[in-house]
Amino acid sequence: MEFQGYERPNGLVGIRNTVLVIAVCDCGEPAAQQMVKGIEGAVAVTQYHGCIALEVVPTLVGAAVNPNIYGTLLVAMGCEGQRAEPMAEQIAAAGKPVEVVDIQATGSTRGAIEKGREIVQRMVSEAAKQQRKPFDISKLAVAVKCGGSDTTSGIAANPAIGVMSDMMVDAGARVVMIEPIEAIGAEEELAARAINDKVREDVLRWVGDEEKRWTVPGAAVDFMCGGNVKGGLTTLEEKSLGAVHKSGHRPISGVLQATTTRVDRLPDKGGFYLMGGIHIELQAMTYQAAAGAQVIVFATGRGGSFGHAISPIVKVTGHPETWARMGDDMDVNASTIMEGTESIESVGKRIFDEVLAVASGKVTKGEELGFYNFNVWRHDPRLEVLLGMEGGKE
C-alpha cells in the first residue's frame, strides 16, 4: 500500500513541502511573520515562554526536522538565552536546509525582514522542484488526538479512529497517541496491550506521572471542560474510556518521552506508540509533530476550527448536529454511526482512505481556511524535579 510523498535526504518522507520560519522567541515573531507574508508554501511560528526557556528547544527542533518541512529559517533577536546557532546545527544534522537571521546583528528590523524574505523565497523555489513519488505506507506516521469530546466521541468518532489505527499498524505504518491525562482510569487496559514488561511499566508510569502533576495543591485531576459536560459526559473515567478507543486494539510498542530536556522521535519500526506531553489540543499536536507524525487525526464531538503549521489535521466528528452545523470544518462524518446507517468498521475504513488521500496531497478543511496553528508546551522543570519525574532528573 502506497502514498505519494516527498523524499528527504535522511530517508524520511514528507506529505507537505513547507518552508518553516521559527522565531526563536516571541520578540522576533512580528519580523518572522513579515518574512513569510504573501509567500505561498511558507509559514512562521514561535513559542511564548520567553527567551531563556531552554525546555522548548527540543520541541522547536523536532518541528523543524519533521519530514513535512523542506527547510527552516531561524529568526533570532540576538540576545536570547536559547541561541539559534546550536538549534541550526541540530536541524542541519537531519539533512535539512537551515539558515539564521539575527535581527540585532543585521542592524535593523527592516533589513532583517528583507534578508529573511530573500531566504524564504529561495527556499520555496528550491522546494518547488521536489516532486511527489510513491512510497510504502511504512513511511507514514499518524498521530491521533481528541478534543471537544462529548458522548458521541466515545461511541462513534474515537472507535472509528481506532479501526483506522489498527489498519495503519497492520499495513506497517506508525500511530502515536498522546494526552496521558485522558487515559486515567483506563491505564490497566492499555498496559495489558504492552509488548513486554518494560513497555507495560512505561505505560503505567506514563499515566502515573501525569497524576502526580495534578497532586499539587490547587490542582485537581478530576476535571471536565464545559463542552464535555454540555456534551453529556459525567465522569473522568467515562471520558477516558471513550478517549482510548482511538488507540485501537494492537499491541503498544513503546512510550515516547516529552520532558524538559527531550522530545523522542518515532522509531522507524511500524506499530502503535504512546507519547508523554500534554492534553491541550494544539500543544499536544505540536509534540506529535515534533515526534515526526506527518498527519494528525482529530476526533471532536463539539467541533473544532483550526489547523496545524507542521502536520495537516483530519477532523472527525460523530455528532449529527455538529456535522450539520460545522460540516465545512470537518473532514470525515462519523455521525452515520450514531444514526445507525453505517458501521464503525466502515467509517474507520473511510478515515483510513482519507488519511492516505491527505498524505498524497489532498487539502484538509483547516488548510483550505489557511489555518496553521502552532503552540509549544513547557513543562516547569522545578515542578518536575519536586515531584521526582524522570524528565527532571535528566
Image: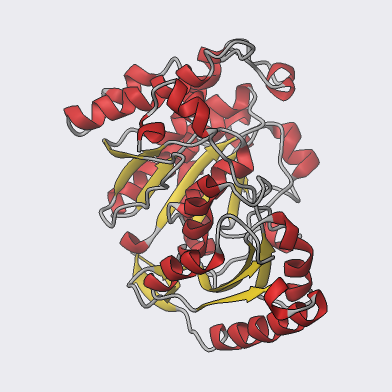
- Quarter of image, res 177: top left
x 71%, y 32%: residue: 302
Is any part of residue 23 visible from this angle?
Answer: yes
* Image vertical order of residue 239 relative to residue 8, above or below: above
**Where is residue 114 shown, x and y percent of the image?**
76, 83
Nearest the viewer among 380 and 91 is 380
Nearest the viewer among 28 and 310 is 28
Query: Seen in the image, is 61 located left or right of residue 334?
Result: left
x 74%, y 75%: residue: 35
Q: Which quadrant is the N terminus positioned in?
A: bottom left
Query: Seen in the image, is 188 located left or right of residue 229?
Result: left
* Image vertical order of residue 131 relative to residue 339, above or below: below
**Where is residue 329 shown, x and y percent of the image?**
73, 49
x 51%, y 55%: residue: 295
| Applied colour scheme | secondary structure
**Where is residue 184 shown, x and y percent of the image?**
46, 18
**Where is residue 338 shown, x and y percent of the image?**
61, 28
* Image vertical order of residue 99 relative to residue 233, above or below: below
Q: Which quadrant is the C terminus positioned in?
A: top left
x 71%, y 49%: residue: 306
Nearest the viewer among 233 and 321 is 233
Is any part of residue 241 visible from this angle?
Answer: no
Nearest the viewer among 321 and 193 is 193
Query: Seen in the image, is 24 located left or right of residue 274?
Result: right
